[in-house]
Image (spheres, helix red, strand yellow):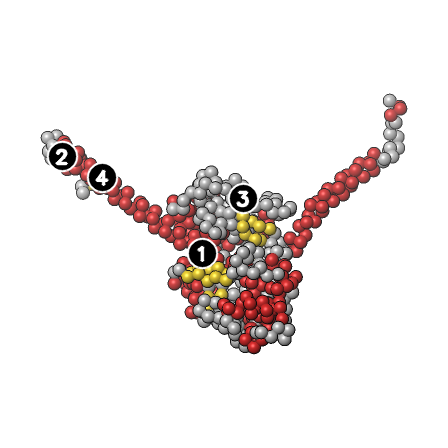
Amino acid sequence: MPLRNGEPARTPIASLFPNWRSSGKAALLMAGLLLGSAGTALAQSAPAADADLIAKGRYLATAADCAACHTAPHGGVPFAGGYGIDSPLGKIVSTNITPSKANGIGSYSEADFARAVRDGVAKDGTHLYPAMPYTAYAKMSDADLKAIYAYLMHEVKPAESTPPKTALPFPFSIRASMAVWNLLFLDTTPFKPDPSKPADWNRGAYLAEALAHCSTCHTPRNLFMAEDHGQSLGGGSLGAWYAPNITSDRTAGIGGWSDDELIAYLRTGHVAGKAQAAGPMAEAVENSLQHLNDADLKALVVYLRGTRPIAGETKPRYDFGKASVAELTLRGLPGEAPNENGFRVFSGTCAACHQLNGQGNSAYPSLFNNTATGAGNADNLIATVLFGVRRTVGDKTAFMPGFGPGAFYTDRLSDQDIADVSNYVLAHYGNPALKVTAADVAKAREGGEKPLLAKLAPYALPGAVAVVIVLLLFIGLLRLSRGARPAAPGAASPSSH
């Protein structure tokens, strides 16, 4: 191309078409074809780029387990909210995050979305509760947030419904107090790869610490319900359920599991002779973990293998118990069985599925070599009997009915019944040192042990009133003391004026 003053010379368009004036229609047609081809190429490339971004966002939203909390159970509209999350401070209802402008996040800009996800602050300035794990999502990259935003805005269908509002008791109902909590406990530092670690470890760390937010459940909390990072992944209470230690410790954690077992558990929620996912973990497997690709599951395992070990139990949870012939031997001999009520409940309610010797079958797990019966506390055993198990992986559903609240098609067992059958199972198949009481079951039925902060909540309003009264009395006394102060020497009295 010839240069003019050092710049490429522009070729007149007429020179491209020698018969321009005599064949104007042809020239216009040719120009139109050229422009049309360019426009078609652009139109095809832009949606392709958007499609890739949306597909990436779909995968990341799945890894972040967004649907599990933002979809109401039993056929709720995806991402329309309405799921009641049982927190120690009360039930927190998830919001609509579909692109509905009236009821969801349709009016959110990408910056608004990022602020909500990473800082826990909605577009209108309302503070979110950390049941939405923004404390973990704060580590998410800009690129991943952009992809999730594109997915929610362009593929998820708008839902024109508004879930019930969260109504926590005072003082937790004051959302503005979360600003102080965030100031104290929210770390907004993005995830930074460790250059001394391999790529798969860093990928696993990003998945575990940011997207999959493992520490949200598996780390104990302090007095103010913030994660105790000194005990990260060392096990934490989830109300009625308990998220166990998943550090690399060989006894208390997952150090004694093989890589294949860990991957199988993440993908299916079941490993024979080890554990079965129930409660919140079953939801994580069903809605999120089973859909991760092989590389990401392996990366998670690499990361967990490298975590700081936190000791606890002196024997692995899955090493307790063995098959027992007690049920077969004692059947038909009422009055001779120790813990007769527990045996009666087990024989009539449990043995048909878990087998006479407790070894289970292809559909129901063994009651021995089972982390629910061999753990250092009986929380998950009690919760399983109360609330049951439902976990769908692929086209297979693992199901056990609950015998507590909502047990419409099973015998609804009393607190004492559940305590007795739990003790029978522990004595014959699990950790015999554990003893369950009816009070333990009642506590689990009501959502588990309340943290000190929740126990103090009922006294918050009377305490606030008392503080106000004391301040008013103090101010009143201060004014009275000033009014009764004697006049200074030489000061004129009112009668002298």
- Sequence-wise, the earlier of marks 4 and 1 is 4
Callout 1 amino acid: Asn
Q: Residue at x 57, y 74 (%)?
A: 331
Say which residue label 4 marks: 36
Q: In the shown orientation, is residue 6 left or right of residue 153?
A: left
Residue 123 seen anywhere in this rendered image of the structure: yes
- Sequence-wise, the earlier of marks 3 and 2 is 2
C-alpha span from label 3 to label 4: 51 Å
Callout 2 amino acid: Ala
C-alpha span from label 4 to label 2: 15 Å
Which element carries disc 4, helix, strand or loop? helix
Say which residue label 2 marks: 26
Q: Residue at x 63, y 75 (%)?
A: 336
Q: Residue at x 48, y 57 (%)?
A: 283
Say which residue label 1 marks: 287
- Sequence-wise, the earlier of marks 1 and 2 is 2
User: Could you classify mark 3 by the number of other residues whose Cα lies within 10 Å: few (under 14), some (14-19), or many (20 or more)?
Assistant: some
Front in this rendered view, residue 336 or 154: 336
The single residue placed furthest to the front in the displayed view is 332
Place of residue 230 in the rendered image (x, y in percent of width and height, measured from the top left): 58, 62
Front in this rendered view, residue 52 or 408: 408
C-alpha span from label 4 to label 1: 44 Å
Q: Residue at x 49, y 49 (%)?
A: 72
Place of residue 160 in the rendered image (x, y in percent of width and height, measured from the top left): 45, 40
Say which residue label 3 marks: 164
